[in-house]
Amino acid sequence: MIKNGQVAFVTGANRGIGLETARELGKRGITVVLGSRDSKKGEAAAAKLRDEGITAEALGFDVTKSQDHQKAYDYFAKKYGRLDILVNNAGVLKESQISATGSAPNPVSAVSPEVLRETFETNFFAPVALTRKLLPLIRKSPAGRIVNVSSILSSLTLHSDPNSPIYPFKTFGYDTSKAALNAFTVHLAYELRDDKIKVNSAHPGWVKTEMGGPNAPMEPSEGGKTSAQLATLADDGPSGGFFHLGQRLPW
């Protein structure tokens, strides 16, 4: 699979895991377009990558706005005529942060309908709609890759196992929205099973970011490795899976 000449779109990429994913892809010679709600922060992040020798561009982009989906489509269609890699990284955790001990301060009964809707809008409905919009451009790539950034907290298998290390880590809205995103991965991979496009879910790890908090064991520089690996899979690589640093995770 030829990496030079490829173009990737990473949403929520002006900081954290999204920025590190863009950096990892850029190091591989891939042109990276950073989607960011704050255009100034997005351009600052792209400029930082360019200073590192990476070909990086910024696109003002809100994943929850359908007009921005059209904006992204027009951008890639006009400038590149295709899209090789889509990393659906933008996401939110509207509930209280998970504590260092793993307790979740907000039980199911305390999560408001508004928080659930907002969480699902950003973490599930928006990436589904964006992927559908950009799929015609991804089909034009000789080796399209779609990466849905999920979380190990989406795993129903692990959440239902009292012996699992994540068993007490329960944030209802976030976990269920990412489980829905995983279902999208499975269904889209099946739909595209006869194409050259690969679709996978990534668990980046518990990373020191604004969302992950200061108690996370992984440094930000490690946060983009799984997404970058899945975005650059060889033609005989897997599709329809859930991975962390090359290890397959249970749904």
Image (tube, rainbow, N blue to C red):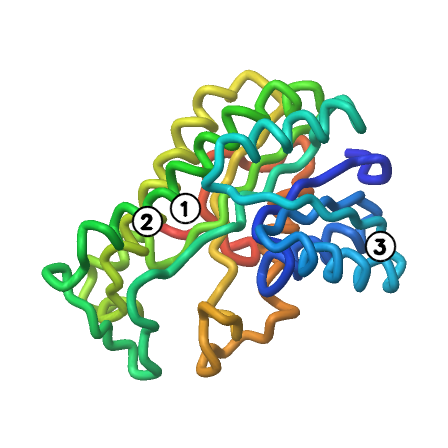
- Type of the residue with mark 1: Thr
Q: Which kind of residue does numbered mark 3 sit on?
A: Ile
Q: Tell me the quarter of the picture where residue 54 sits.
A: bottom right
Q: Earlier in the sequence, mark 2 or mark 3?
A: 3
* 175 horizontally vs 139: left or right: left
Rendered image quadrant of residue 236:
top right
Q: Residue at x 22, y 71 (%)?
A: 168
- Label 2 or label 3, whichever lies nearer to me, is 2
The kind of secondary structure element at disc 1 is: helix
Q: Nearer the viewer, mark 3 or mark 1?
A: 1
Circle 3: element type: loop
Residue under label 2, please give it.
118
Tell me, yes or no, whether the two marked residues, 1 and 2, touch with CB atoms within 8 Å: yes
Image: 53 above or below 87: below
Question: Which residue position holds label 1?
Answer: 122
Residue 146 horizontal/vertical position (percent): 57, 36
Q: In the rendered view, would you say 90 is above or below 233? A: below
Left or right of residue 169: residue 238: right
Q: Please state, as top left, top right, bottom left or bottom right, where the N terminus lies in the image.
A: top right
Dot label at residue 54: 3
Given residues 177 and 15, the one toward you in this image is 15
Q: Residue at x 47, y 28 (%)?
A: 189
Looking at the picture, which amino acid does disc 2 mark? Glu
Relative image position of residue 22 (x, y in whole percent): 70, 53
Rounded to the nearest angstrom, the CA distance separating label 2 from label 3 is 34 Å
Taking the spot 60% from the left edge, 26% from the top edge, the residue there is: 197
Residue drawn at x 27%, y 58% is 158
Q: How far across and down, in percent of the image, does residue 104 sit?
A: 23, 72
